[in-house]
Structure formats: C-alpha cells, structure tokens
Amino acid sequence: MKIGLAIQQVRSAESDLADELYKVGERHKTDQEIYHLTKKLAKMSRDHIEELDRYSDRYRVSAAPGGSEEEGGAPGLLGSLREKGSGLLDSVREEGSNLLDPVREKGSEMMGRRPESGLLLLRDLRQLSSLASDVSINWVILGQGAQAARDHELLQTVRECHAQNLRQMKWANTMIKQISPQVLMS
C-alpha cells in the first residue's frame, strides 16, 4: 500500500500552506483581519498535520513533512532541510517573537499606506488559494485511498480536515473577490 506516501503528500502540502499563511500574515500586519485570520488558518493546517501523525506507524510515514526517502530509509537532503526549517519556524512561532519582527512590522506599516500593498495582497491571496487547492486535491487522493483500504478512522480524519481545508480555500477566494475590484480600479 502507498497510503503512507499519500499521507506524506498531504502533510507536505499542509506544511507549505501553513508556512505561506504565516508569511502572508506577517507581510500584511497592518490589516488586522488578514493578520489574525492567516494565523488562525495556519494553526488549522498545523493541527491537520498533527492529526495525520496518528497514522505514521500504521502506514510507515516518514517524519519528514514532504521529503522522499533515499535508499536505506533515511530522509533525503530536501526532506531533512524541510524538517529542520519547519522545526525552526515552529519554535520561533511558539516563542512569539522573531528577530525580524520589528523590520517586518515597519515594512508592513509603510506598505499599508501605498497602493502597491493592494497588489501585493492580491498576489498573496492568489498564492494561498493555489496552495489550498493543492492541499484539497491531496486530501481527495488520501480519502480515496482510505476508502479503498476500508480504514474508517482515517477516512473520518480526511473528511474533517478536508472540510476545514475547503474553508481555507473559500476564505482566500472570498478575499480575492472582495479586494480585486478596489485594487484594480484604484
């Protein structure tokens, strides 16, 4: 069975989405709605990864969020780097501070007053929508595998997490619809 591979793909896609949500929130700190919602949505993706971790023993899922394993069972270089980078980002987020926070905050304040900030936000939302769509497709694939394997517990996890992922995608698309007219007509 290759369900472990499908789980790895979902984990990797969720990790990418969470990271990008976090970055977008930091980039648009002056927009409180964007800032707080991206943090909440990023936590949702991190929670999905934790849910999937429950199946790592059952389906022999690698600890690396998206790296393929090289011969010998060790995670590849890319997987190791991704795992270390993700761990570093998680520790920074847990501490609640970052050395670059003052720089990002000032940059966000300066951009928040410029017309280009709308174009930047629109680009960021497009990227989030694309990443959320990628996550969704990976959830669908995993759900089909769980159904074929008759793993009702995994299938229930897929249904719950995928429903939340669809909310993430809908949020990004709704925000695009809301801000594009303003941005494009200014």
Image (cartoon, rainbow, N blue to C red):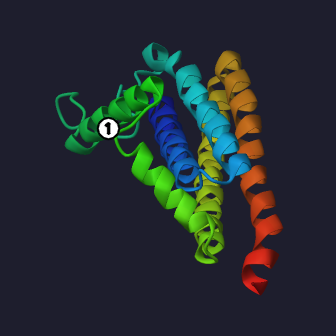
Left or right: where 101 falls relative to 178: left
Query: Is 21 placed above or below 120 here?
Result: above
Specify the amino acid type for callout 1. Gly
- In the picture, the quarter occupied by the C terminus is bottom right
Question: Which residue shows up at 54% across the image and 58% down it?
Answer: 108
Residue 165: percent from left, percent from top: 70, 41
Which residue corresponds to mark 1? Answer: 85
Residue 71: percent from left, percent from top: 18, 35
Where disc 1 sits, the SS reads helix
Left or right: where 78 falls relative to 185: left
Location of residue 152 (image quadrant): top right
Left or right: where 98 falls relative to 183: left
Q: Nearer the viewer, residue 110 or 125?
A: 110
Query: Is 135 placed above or below 48 here?
Result: below
Q: Nearer the viewer, residue 115 or 106?
A: 106
Q: Nearer the viewer, residue 115 or 10?
A: 115
Q: Is residue 69 visible?
A: no
Location of residue 95 (image quadrant): top left
Q: Is residue 16 visible?
A: yes
Query: Is 8 placed above or below 107 here?
Result: above
